[in-house]
């Protein structure tokens, strides 16, 4: 490994006693709330206090409405900042028509309805007008004085390719909508704390930073990172770099962990407000299997202190959290500045030598395919619990060659552990990896919608009872008669 930017990974013990707590310490539940039962939400809130955290990031469009009274009251009573992470087009223009959507080069909209990846056309006057009206409506109806709003564009990479937009990059296509949203927030008269998301395509600060004098905080999302190494450490180029450089030429032929640290440093140099990092720790639960990267993340905490970064929020939620509890304990103590030191596990040492996956699907579970982890007995030493080992082995076999019998077996295993694992995400994501010729020949309406919907949280929001819809879908995929074609 070759360190850059003067930041090298620390061998052996990671930690010691860095000075004082970060200003911002929290978790981001991402789009997971639809997968929580009420008791799970309360357990997660209690963990915030246990971990001495002061920030909770939620997605209002994904399961939040059901749990919002409990969440709001808990955060208010415990001094926790509640940040609403807004996919802005979904939040402000949920009923927009395809006529104002971003389009592909052939002129047809990327989507036929507003989902988390739906963008509006940046050069369409009607789109801008509808967006402005939607922001005003949201501020009047869905925002209370003192709320925190994190403004993000749509998820994903599908930019508008109409004649007016195709010369604009991701920053340029988002900037006019960002300015409209900030203008309306300032005009509404409610005291609101405004956050901005720096993410894929927008990792770099815009050339014109004028609007940022009215933005209170920037959250920098490290989603694309090489997961086993600290930021600033050189590693082999892989498929992730090919994603990054689609929207920023500076990312081309550059290890993503070096690129991300450079962009974070650029934000710190150009932006004087609160700047904090979002680490995708559970990354939609990693199929409820652990991520052996505690040492790398603790090293990052020290890097952030050196850069005067104001804090970190980690992706965490209750379904599947068992694989991450110990890791979150270490990280939360590090955020407070009272970590006594951490010695990397043998599995972390193995992972730190991995060069990165050739297949993006294996990115979060790359260690399962390492030679040192191939024998089941070795994997058992690393994972400990028999059921976790069985899940890991079955997922490894399935990702190697997906087919319906293996999927059916995995669905049964996931349903047997509904109280412990993020069972719905396991079922949904693995089902979408099934080759078309292996899918059920006569799918139910729910199954057909699953295979046609890129993101499971959009699938859930379309149903009246997400928990029951999840269960029925999983059970239908596990039925024996789908195998008899």
Image: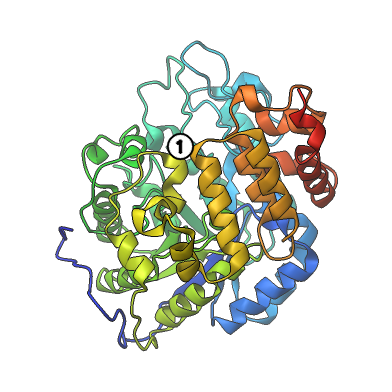
Quarter of the image that includes the C terminus:
top right
How crowded is the residue under tag 1: few (<14 C-alpha within 10 Å), some, or many (20+)? many
Camera-nearest residue between 23 and 316: 316
Q: Quadrant of residue 243?
A: top left
> What is the count of numbered marks?
1
Q: Which residue is mark 1?
A: 174
Please report the residue visible at 75 percent of the width from the left and 63 percent of the height from the top.
68
The vertical placement of 343 against 251, above or below, is: below
Q: Quadrant of residue 126?
A: top right
Residue 416 on image: x %, y %: 75, 58
The vertical placement of 478 against 377, above or below, is: above
Residue 170 on image: x %, y %: 40, 34
Please report the residue visible at 62 percent of the width from the left and 23 percent of the height from the top.
436
Please report the residue visible at 58 percent of the width from the left and 27 percent of the height from the top.
435
The vertical placement of 64 against 420, above or below, is: above
Residue 8 on image: x %, y %: 18, 67
| Left or right: 49 as drawn, with respect to 446 | left
| Left or right: 18 as drawn, with respect to 425 | left
Quarter of the image that includes the N terminus:
bottom left
The vertical placement of 460 against 3, above or below, is: above
Q: Is residue 480 visible?
A: yes
| Left or right: 95 as drawn, with respect to 244 | right
Render colour scheme? rainbow
Camera-nearest residue between 113 and 425: 425
Q: Is residue 75 visible?
A: no
Residue 410 on image: x %, y %: 66, 48
Identify the element where label 1 is drawn.
helix
Please report the residue visible at 64 percent of the width from the left and 35 percent of the height from the top.
115
| Left or right: 431 as drawn, with respect to 181 | right
């Amino acid at each position: 490994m070759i360190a850059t930017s003067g930041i090298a990974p620390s061998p052996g013990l990671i930690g010691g006693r860095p000075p004082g707590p970060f200003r911002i310490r929290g978790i981001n539940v991402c789009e997971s709330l639809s997968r929580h039962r009420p008791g799970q939400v309360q357990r997660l809130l209690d963990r915030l206090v246990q971990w001495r955290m002061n920030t909770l990031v939620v997605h209002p469009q994904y399961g939040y409405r059901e749990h919002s009274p409990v969440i709001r009251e808990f955060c208010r009573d415990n001094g926790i900042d509640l940040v609403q992470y807004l996919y802005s087009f979904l939040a402000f223009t949920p009923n927009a028509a395809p006529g104002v959507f971003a389009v592909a080069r052939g002129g047809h909209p990327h989507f036929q309805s507003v989902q988390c990846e739906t963008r509006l056309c940046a050069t369409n006057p009607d789109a801008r007008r509808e967006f402005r009206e939607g922001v005003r409506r949201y501020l009047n109806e869905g925002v209370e004085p003192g709320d925190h709003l994190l403004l993000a564009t749509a998820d994903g990479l599908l930019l508008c390719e109409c004649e007016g937009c195709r010369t604009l990059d991701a920053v340029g296509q988002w900037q006019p909508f960002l300015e409209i949203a900030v203008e309306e927030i300032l005009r509404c008269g409610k005291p609101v704390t405004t956050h901005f998301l720096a993410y894929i395509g927008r990792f770099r600060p815009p050339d014109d930073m004028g609007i940022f004098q009215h933005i209170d905080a920037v959250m920098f999302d490290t989603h694309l990172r090489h997961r086993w190494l600290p930021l600033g450490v050189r590693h082999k180029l892989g498929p992730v770099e090919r994603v990054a450089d689609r929207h920023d030429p500076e990312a081309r032929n550059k290890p993503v962990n070096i690129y991300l640290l450079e962009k974070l440093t650029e934000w710190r140099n150009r932006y004087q407000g609160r700047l904090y990092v979002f680490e995708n720790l559970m990354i939609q639960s990693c199929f409820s299997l652990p991520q052996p990267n505690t040492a790398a993340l603790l090293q990052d905490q020290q890097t952030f202190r050196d850069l005067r970064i104001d804090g970190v929020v980690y992706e965490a939620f209750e379904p599947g959290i068992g694989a991450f509890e110990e890791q979150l304990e270490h990280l939360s103590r590090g955020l407070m500045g009272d970590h006594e030191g951490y010695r990397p596990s043998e599995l972390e040492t193995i992972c730190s030598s991995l060069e990165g996956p050739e297949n993006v699907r294996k990115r979060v579970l790359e260690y399962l395919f390492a030679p040192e982890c191939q024998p089941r007995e070795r994997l058992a030493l690393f994972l400990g619990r028999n059921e976790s080992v069985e899940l890991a082995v079955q997922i490894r076999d399935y990702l190697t060659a997906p087919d319906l019998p293996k999927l059916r077996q995995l669905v049964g295993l996931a349903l047997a552990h509904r109280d412990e694992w993020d069972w719905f995400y396991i079922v949904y994501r693995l089902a979408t990896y099934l080759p078309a010729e292996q899918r059920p020949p006569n799918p139910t309406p729910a199954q057909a919608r699953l295979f046609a919907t890129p993101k499971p949280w959009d699938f859930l929001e379309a149903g009246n009872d997400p928990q029951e819809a999840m269960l029925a879908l999983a059970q239908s995929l596990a039925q024996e008669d789908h195998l008899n074609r």
